[in-house]
Image (cartoon, rainbow, N blue to C red):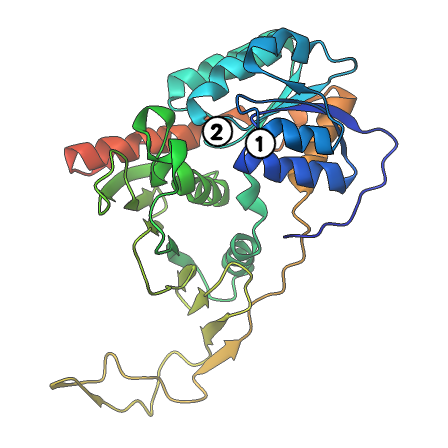
Amino acid sequence: MCFIKKEIVKEKVKIGIIGCGGMGGYHLGRMSSCGLFDVIGILDIDPAVKKKADFRHIPFFKPEELEKFFALPGLQAVLIATPNDFHKPYAVAAAEHGLAVLSEKPVTLSCADLQEMLDAAEKNGTLFSVHQNRRWDPDYLCMKKIAESGMIGHVYKIESKVVGSNGIPGAWRKVKSQGGGMIFDWGVHLMDQILLFKQDTPITSVRCTTSYVYQEEVDDGFELEITFADGVAVTITIDTNSFVKVPRWMIYGMDGTAVIDTFNCKKGKVIAVKTRHDAKLKGVQAGNGFTKTMADRSKGTVKVSRLPKIVDDGLDLYRNFCKCVLEKTPEKSIITGKQLMRVMKLIELSFESAEKNEVIKTDF
């Protein structure tokens, strides 16, 4: 459980939750405790969710009562945390009722569907945002700080990896038509992080391979190689059958290398070169051979530093959403339609590359 400091605000956003299962329940807890929202309604297909609503004295609605839900007095916004294939119809309906939308990720299942959602929001002058919360993960912010600080020189390669050994979660996450699989589940987060970091640089090629270890109809892991126009290469890896943890990030720079081992950044280091030429370099026995190329550098030629400290409470997305709702400024959302479309385009190209087993040349 992540405990958050309660915000003191003059006005809260009155929000309703559509879909209050795992992620919806997570938002219910955070929204109820952060001080920015007043949750005034819950709509869900599962009658068991009514107990959550009753416990908090929040009105509960069934899907067939959507119009009553939208008619809640003072309702300003909705959070959509249903299975992915229901995001679009609920988002469009909410926009047509003049309501701001915060959708769970992935926003939807195709660029065409996303465009319909964006068009509905623009037509009705409403806010449309997506819960791309991992833009504020400490490990991502740490990677970004290292890369942008110049402490390891020009960064030419980045590896972003998340692995586990528990397979694909149940329910809709195993159903292809509902946007199941790891590309849609975790890939959307890691792609969003990288594309935000490289937001001003076009992608020139995409290569993706997917795994089906568990023999489900959706991917249980993938490896995605992205090449940018400036030559920077990024590899994103997800594996749900790895019983050994790997570093969360590897950042390769011309003047050093950094490793971030965990999400909380408690393990990792930055090694930067002090003296490029190692006059005392000695060869070592490596397996059945001898090498100088792969030998450890002499002490004094490099500097080892701790990871930069990251301080962030993870509430900036909520704060921005509420500010845009209350001030009626949807154009000031920090999650933009252009960003969402670029991520969705990359997802589509990843599937295409995996299906064709080839590198996809592109420019976007």
Visible residue check, residue 32 = yes
Q: Give the percent coordinates (x, y) of residue 349.
A: 29, 31
- Quadrant of res 204: top left
| Residue 258 % position (x, y) | 45, 67
Q: Amino acid at mark 1?
A: Ile
Q: Which residue lies under the disc numbered 2?
A: 340
Quarter-wise, where is residue 224 in the image? top left
Out of 173 and 109, give the one closest to the viewer: 173
179 left or right, relative to 306: left
The picture places residue 251, in percent across and down from the top left corner, at 42, 61
Circle 2 SS class: helix
Q: Is residue 340 above or below residue 293?
A: above
Instruction: Measure the C-alpha gap from mark 2 to mark 1.
Output: 7 Å
Q: Amino acid at mark 2?
A: Leu
Q: Residues within 10 Å of mark 2 (few under 14, many from 20)?
A: many
Residue 61 vertical position relative to residue 167 in the rendered view, above or below: above
Residue to which mark 1 is pinned:
335
Left or right: 28 in relation to 286: right
Is there CB contact under 8 Å for labels 2 and 1?
yes
Residue at the (56%, 9%) spot, across then down: 64
